Amino acid sequence: MKWTPLFVLGLMLITSCNTGNNQEQDAEEIPLEQQGEQPVGQTIIPGGDSVSAVLEVENDAYDFGKIKEGEKVEHEFKFTNTGTSPLIISNVQASCGCTTPEYSKNPIAPGDEGMVKVVFNSAGQLGKQHKVVTVTSNASSPNTLLHLRGEVEK
């Protein structure tokens, strides 16, 4: 009787491994006449190409110097999409709750500029500071780090 729960748990784990969807079944099939001359066995992904967006930051670090505790620092990090397809920022995350980011929510066309505005609230943040903001996008390098540095004095 002691082995029954373990046996049932093991059986559940073994059978659950094969219940996932097969990704190959989800792929859209392209009729042979539309595929052109492709090597045998090559997978064709509709809309898949090597074009990508590139997020190029003007300056990825900002030093706000020395400020008094309780002051707020605002800075805009500007960037350009130097790629060949629209740049879409999906998330911007600060390393701590004292730093609030705002960012361009619309796709940024190739050659256009965007920005990430960061507000740092120094209340309760004495001493040297280094805050990191992570920008997640569809760029060829999906994560871009922005740095905010300075010192907070009483």
Image (cartoon, rainbow, N blue to C red):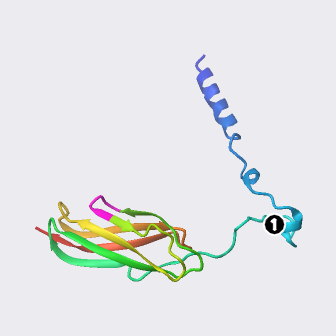
Residue under label 1, please give it.
42
> In terms of depth relative to the viewer, which is nearer, 93 or 78?
78
Residue ID at (71%, 52%): 23
**Residue visible at 88% across and 64% down?**
32
Residue in view at x 45 percent, y 66 percent: 105
Query: The C terminus is located in which quarter?
Result: bottom left
The spot of residue 89 in percent (x, y) is 48, 67
* Chief SS of the magenta region: loop
Spot the residue most to the top. Answer: 1
Location of residue 134 in the rendering, given as x and y in whole percent from the top left corner: 41, 67
Quadrant housing residue 40: bottom right
Q: Tag count in the figure? A: 1
Q: Which residues are magenta?
A: 95-100
Residue 129: in magenta span: no
Q: Is residue 46 left or right of residue 151?
A: right
Q: Which of 128 and 146 lies nearest the eye of the viewer?
A: 146
Disc 1 crowd rating (10 Å Cα; few below 14, some 14-19, many 20+) is few
Residue 59 horizontal/vertical position (percent): 38, 82
- 144 left or right of 151? right
Which of the image's four quarters has the N terminus? top right
To which quarter of the image does residue 28 belong?
A: bottom right
Residue extending farthest to the front is 106
Q: Is residue 130 left or right of residue 85?
A: left
In the image, residue 151 sits, relative to residue 30, either above or below, namely below
Q: Secondary structure at mark 1?
A: loop
> In the image, residue 35 lies at what x, y percent?
84, 68
Q: Tag 1: residue type?
A: Gln
